């Protein structure tokens, strides 16, 4: 699957990196990024950092996350699904969740998935992790099946991931190899108290996260194409037509 993902990214890799970087900034996944050269320090603020600190700001950010970021988490999967299909794609795919008439459908699916995973995580970490894998194909299935409601898509994802969750977990685990060097540098910096090594580890994590992200997302889309889309069940899957 990873080999296929590399092939699909040829010719669109750097465009995918740009889309991925913008996505990570908007969703706040990058956090506040500090740039340090000797005694000179600057930072790339998050959207939250740009707003004044207050209870009202926290409420606004909470509403923004709920109404905007949650659906975007779904639509970024569609962008990389197009890449996995070998189709010509565009950043506009990410905004489809807002321009299509069924925004509420995707919003509900995003919100319910988050609630279910959080509730399971309240029991223990492992049940929450397992359920996050169970629901991981919800948004791709909804794109392929416009007639599915939010709960139907979540249920279908859970059913089709039965017996496949560990396979996807191992696939994800294989990407940890990319982070061995920055983890080693971070451990060395912490053990020796060397701040320069810790800063270097932060840079390495940042760069790897940016450039491996599209590869990771495309691999997930390949997993969906090969293992989930045509998995046998009572509900036939119709390929999404844009």
Image (cartoon, rainbow, N blue to C red):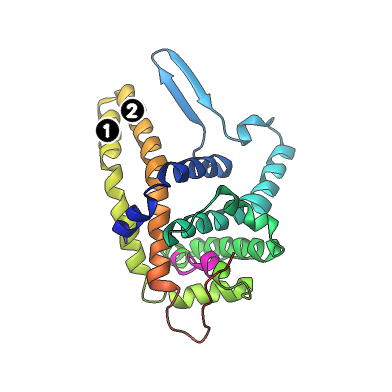
Give percent across and percent down for residue 241: 57, 68
The residue furthest top is 39
The residue at the point 33 percent across, 32 percent down is 201
Q: Secondary structure at mark 1?
A: helix
The quarter of the image holding the N terminus is: bottom left
Q: Which residue is mark 1?
A: 185
The local crowd at label 1, few if under 14, some if 14 to 19, many if 20 or more residues have their Cα within 10 Å, is some
Can you say whether 68 is above or below 33 in the image?
Answer: below
Give the tally of numbered discs.
2
Q: Quadrant of residue 231?
A: bottom left
Residue 74 lies in the magenta-colored region: no
Residue at the spot of label 2:
200
> Residue at position x 51%, y 57% from top?
77
The residue range painted magenta reads 133-141
The quarter holding residue 74 reads: bottom right
Residue 139 x %, y %: 55, 64
Q: Reply above or below: 8 against 36.
A: below
Q: Left or right: where does residue 230 sit relative to residue 44?
A: left
The CA span between labels 2 and 1 is 7 Å
At 53% from the left edge and 70% from the top edge, which residue is drawn?
141
Q: Nearer the viewer, residue 55 or 177?
A: 177
Is residue 207 or residue 201 the one in the foreground? 207
Whether pointer 2 and pointer 1 mark residues with C-beta atoms closer than 8 Å, the reply is: yes
Foreground residue among 38 and 88: 88
Q: Is residue 18 visible?
A: yes
């Amino acid at each position: 699957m990873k080999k296929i993902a590399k092939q699909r990214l040829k010719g669109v890799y750097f465009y995918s990196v740009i889309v991925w970087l913008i996505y990570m900034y908007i969703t706040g996944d990058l956090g506040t990024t500090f740039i340090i050269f000797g005694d000179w320090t600057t930072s790339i603020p998050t959207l939250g950092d740009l707003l004044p600190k207050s209870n009202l700001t926290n409420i606004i950010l909470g509403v923004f996350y709920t109404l905007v970021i949650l659906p975007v988490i779904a639509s970024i999967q569609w962008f990389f699904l197009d890449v996995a299909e070998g189709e010509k794609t565009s950043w506009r795919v990410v905004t489809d969740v807002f321009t299509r008439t069924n925004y509420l459908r995707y919003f509900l699916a995003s919100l319910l998935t988050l609630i279910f995973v959080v509730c399971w995580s309240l029991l223990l970490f492992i049940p929450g992790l397992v359920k996050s894998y169970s629901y991981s194909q919800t948004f791709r299935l909804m794109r392929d099946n416009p007639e599915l409601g939010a709960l139907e898509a979540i249920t279908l994802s859970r059913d089709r991931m039965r017996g496949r969750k560990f396979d996807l977990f191992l696939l994800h685990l294989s990407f940890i190899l990319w982070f061995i060097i920055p983890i080693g540098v971070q451990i060395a910096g912490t053990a020796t108290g060397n701040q320069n090594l810790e800063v270097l580890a932060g840079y390495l994590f940042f760069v790897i996260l940016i450039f491996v992200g599209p590869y990771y997302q495309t691999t997930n889309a390949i997993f969906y194409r090969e293992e989930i889309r045509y998995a046998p069940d009572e509900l036939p899957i119709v390929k999404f037509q844009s």
